[in-house]
Image: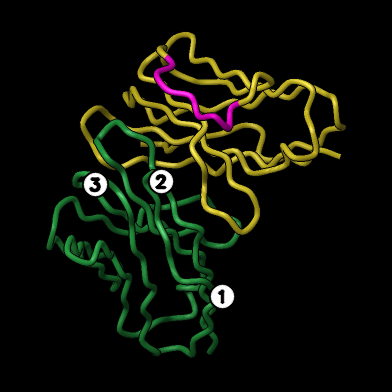
Chain colours: A yellow, B green
Amino acid sequence: DTGVSQDPRHKITKRGQNVTFRCDPISEHNRLYWYRQTLGQGPEFLTYFQNEAQLEKSRLLSDRFSAERPKGSFSTLEIQRTEQGDSAMYLCASSRDNTDTQYFGPGTRLTVL
Amino acid sequence: GDSVTQMEGPVTLSEEACLTINCTYTATGYPSLFWYVQYPGEGLQLLLKATKADDKGSNKGFEATYRKETTSFHLEKGSVQVSDSAVYFCALRKTSYDKVIFGPGTSLSVIP
């Protein structure tokens, strides 16, 4: 396994701009998760895909956030009209069916100025 | 709702000291329990896990036992090293496809 990869690792943007992050899960992992981690806190769940279907979304995921996984492989997370409160580390994780363990990527650190 | 509580940090220990990081959870049913570790500048890594009551997870000298009666999953190590300095997250997962619910994390610094 090459591990979960995320791109970019760091993103600095101005308030009001749109940003998009990419996550490539471990191959053959059909479940993909997005989390957000703010400084000094544990990760908080945002949304989850099984293959290309988005099965659950957290209340944290406002209308400005959208996630896709069009072919059931990589996923994108877009934030529109960014706000300073969106500054956080965005983590992606993947797992196989019927396994407990989620494997996390290195994260994308977003800073909104 | 389901939640995880863990002892506040930061925790500072001398090398070779004993470590205990307390973790308790609130959840219906029988969740799986995890400890994840985040080393400086790196992503979250699974340290150990336990899937049912009285199971003991272990890895790299760390241990934690799933205690259903006290809803706890305390992390222990008999002799810490400088390389163990990291943030440790206790977590639970209700089913094999569910999201992971994390505690706030406990920062550990081990000094020579």
Check the residue under mark 3 and report the chain it is in.
Answer: B
Total labels drawn: 3
Q: Label 3, on which residue? A: B31
- Residue type pointed to by label 3: Pro
Q: What stretch is highlighted in magenta?
A: A54-61
Residue A107 drawn at (x, y percent): 58, 41
Q: Earlier in the sequence, mark 2 or mark 3?
A: 3
Dot 3 surroundings within 10 Å: few (below 14), some, or many (20 or more)? many
Q: Label 2, on which residue? A: B101
* Label 3 SS: loop
Dot 1 surroundings within 10 Å: few (below 14), some, or many (20 or more)? few
Give the spatial CA distance, label 1 vs label 3.
27 Å
**Callout in the foreground (1, 2):** 2
Left or right: residue A14 compared with residue A30: right
* Residue A109 location, quadrant: top right
Q: Label 1, on which residue? A: B10
Asked whether A6 falls inside the magenta stretch, the response is no
Give the spatial CA distance, label 1 vs label 2.
21 Å
